[in-house]
Amino acid sequence: MSTDEQPTNRGFVMYPSRHTQVVRDLAFIEGRRPWAIIEDALEEYVTRHYGKQYKRK
């Protein structure tokens, strides 16, 4: 994420959020809901770092 832009108050985030734009574009390309992409990414992260016993059933 580029931090060379001026900080603006947009809720809790001070810098423009690039990952929301990426998730929105990826959701459109894959034809999925944005929350489903985020849940799959979180599940992949948790299983990679903490093991398969934490995988969603």
Image: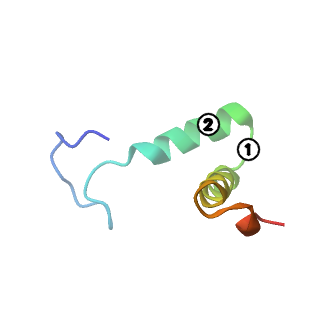
Look at the numbered disc 1 and give the secondary structure of its residue: loop
Give x and y (percent) for residue 54. 71, 68
The residue shown at (48%, 48%) is 20
* Image quarter in which the C terminus is found: bottom right
Quarter occupied by residue 35: bottom right
Q: How crowded is mark 1: few (under 14 residues within 10 Å), some or many (20 or more)?
A: few
Name the residue located 67 percent from the left edge and 58 percent from the top edge: 47
Horizontal and vertical percent for residue 53?
75, 68
Residue wearing tag 1: 32
Foreground residue, 22 or 53?
53
Q: Position of residue 7 (x, y in %)?
A: 18, 52
Are dots 1 and 2 in contact, CB under 8 Å?
yes
Q: In this view, does 40 lie to the left or right of 15?
A: right
**Which residue was labeled with disc 2?**
26
The structure residue drawn at horizontal position 66% and vertical position 52%, both measured from the top left corner, is 44
Q: Coloured how?
A: rainbow
Q: In which quarter of the image is residue 2?
A: top left
Q: Earlier in the sequence, mark 1 or mark 2?
A: 2
Structural distance between the alpha carbons of marks 1 and 2: 8 Å
